Amino acid sequence: MTGPGVSGPATQPDVVIAVRNVQKSFRDASGREAVVLADVSFDVHRGETVVIMGGSGCGKSTLLNCLIGEYAIDGGRIEYRTSTMDAFADVASMSDAELDRLRLQFGILFQSGALFNSMTVADNVALPLREHSSVDPRVIDIVVTLKLEQVHMLAHRHKMPAQLSGGQKKRAGLARATALDPEILFYDEPSAGLDPVTSAAIDELIRDLSTKLQVTSVVVTHHMDSALKIADRLIMLDKGRVIRAGPRDEFLRIKTTAPVDLLDDDERLIHQFMNGRAEGPLTDDQGISEFEKLLVGG
Amino acid sequence: MSDVSSRRSAAGRGVEWVGRVAAGRLAAGAAFVRFVGGVSSLLGVTLAWFGRGLIRRRARAAPATFVRQMVRIGVESIGIVVLVQTFIGIILTLQLAPTLELYGQLERVADVVGIAVFRELGPLLTAIVISGFAGASIAAELGAMVEGEEIKALRAHALNPIRFLIVPRFVATVLMLTGLTVLADVVGVAGGLATSMTVLGVSFDTYMSLTREALTLSDFYTGLIKAGCFGAIVAMIASYEGLNVRGGAEGVGRATTQTVVKSIVALIGVDVIFTAVFFAFKV
């Protein structure tokens, strides 16, 4: 089972990532604590593509940073069981060396591509191979060629990142993320800042890599077209909580249901988000606006 | 009644003002402790990775990275260091000349310029120039890498950013600042020599012979010890500020400014300590 009610240890054998009651807060400049992740639980199964979605500030990027070990969580557990592990291992209790070993089993496509600007595209892809393997440089060159061909970037191998477009940077970043043949791929807003055609091409590439490489993919996005194209399952976050997790068809049903009176409260929120409506539960509960406060002298 | 309340409110405002000032001072003190702690901790981790790199080849950054940083920090700074130190030699000579002439010791300008440049102005001014020239650029580069998620990407690929980015910049700054100080010493004395010969009429032989007599080996190596430490300070402050950039382009700009300001204050502060220690031990 996966969803808001998930609790206890993961029992299904194909679970790769088990997230349990994760909490994360930040302190602002004035020392006030802002809860970003209140209580997040879900499972990710081997080979599936899970899309984590939600509005701006709902905590999805923070969740991704927690999943990759970039942020330490305040409470709960994030456990991995990759093919090289006998049992689940909690990220919070890992040493730096153990976390690095785990990181070798996943690849990440960052929002901006995050290519190293001082290196060519080919060197960017070759870097993880050079650093984490002792294979012959000629073999590395062949692997780099294959990886770049996979994302249709071979013609740009000698270019510097500054010479690439946004979509090309993401493709190159994807080639680098797959350089070590990871089991899990994380994508942070893969469609952000791209035109619809390039965005569709990236979506196809994500689907293609998932099926060809049999990797488990976790995608963070708020682009509904992309989410519905690439997801096997979707997880909707709101105010730091999972309000719904389920297969794509379930979310499609919610998106297309009319009238909305047939939906429960959470479903109405998802309906509003997926259809991009200005009015609905997502915006209703924001309370009195600053403008209104000013008018009434509050 | 209103008088009392207004007096009370004035007193209240006074207490509030004192409280606010005290809180501000405390916050500034905490920020200073955080900064010193952060830079010291970064230095510790950098030295640990440097040590590991000496033992294990895989813990070492590529030699090309070191060379690139040495060229950027050292070779590209040669022109400005030569220019500044030549001016310093000229200024010192012209400032000292009238006073020394009063005592009939005009040629003694060679002693003062030599000692001042070798012991003090060579390493200090070179470090200040490097903090503005290379330190600011290190902070901006690292800050841009933080904003561009490159640092995060390194960690995500199980590659330590300190080993990859900070150790090469640290080693390059320490080595090149030491090398540039040797150059600065020579150029500073040359500036003094040229001015003495052309303006004051001191002969080449007299100037060089007095310089050789005045300078001891300790004048040379105390300057170089300072230069090495100054290099470490500039590299660490620049790296710390760069790695802690927040807030996009504005944050990067702030980091570069902070690097230069904090480096200059730290360099002069540490120079005071060095000078006091050398004075106490008569080095």
Image: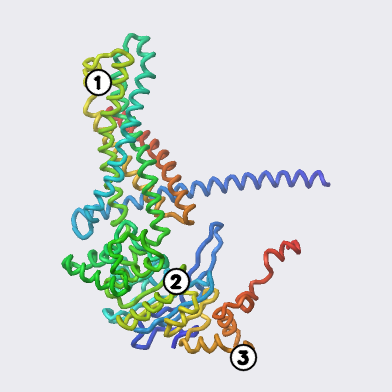
Q: Report the Cα–Cα distance between label 1 and label 3.
A: 95 Å
Which of discs 2 and 1 lies nearer the camera? The answer is: 2
Q: Secondary structure at mark 2?
A: loop
Category of crowding for the residue at label 1, using alpha-carbon neighbours closer than 10 angstroms: few (below 14), some (14–19), many (at least 20): many
Give the residue drawn at x 28%, y 73%.
A149
Q: Is residue A62 visible?
A: no
Tell me: A199 left or right of B100: right
* Mark nearer the N terminus (2 vs 3): 2
Q: Which residue is mark 3?
A: A262
Q: Is residue A96 above or below residue B98?
A: below
| Quadrant holding the C terminus of chain B | top left
Instruction: Please tell me whether residue B53 is drawn above or below residue B85 in the rendered image.
Output: below
Q: Chain of mark 3?
A: A
A3 or A128, nearer to the observer: A128
| Residue highlighted by disc 1 | B211
Residues tagged 2 and 3 counted as in contact (Cβ below 8 A): no
Give the class, few, some or many, for how many residues have Cα within 10 Å of label 3's Cα (few <14, many ≥20): few
Q: x%, y% of residue A239?
A: 55, 74
Q: Position of residue A198 (x, y in %)?
A: 42, 72
Q: Secondary structure at mark 1?
A: helix
Local secondary structure at mark 3: helix
Q: Which mark is residue A2?
A: none
Apparent side of residue B24 relative to residue B129 in the rendered image (left or right): right
Direction bottom: furthest residue: A262
Q: Chain of mark 1?
A: B
Three-letter amino acid code of the residue under disc 1: Thr
Residue picked out by circle 2: A189
User: Mark 2 Cα within 10 Å, few/some/many (few <14, many 20+)?
Assistant: many
Q: Position of residue B199 (x, y in %)?
A: 33, 15
For the residues labelled 1 and 3, say whether their Cβ atoms are less than 8 Å apart. Answer: no
Q: Amino acid at mark 3?
A: Leu
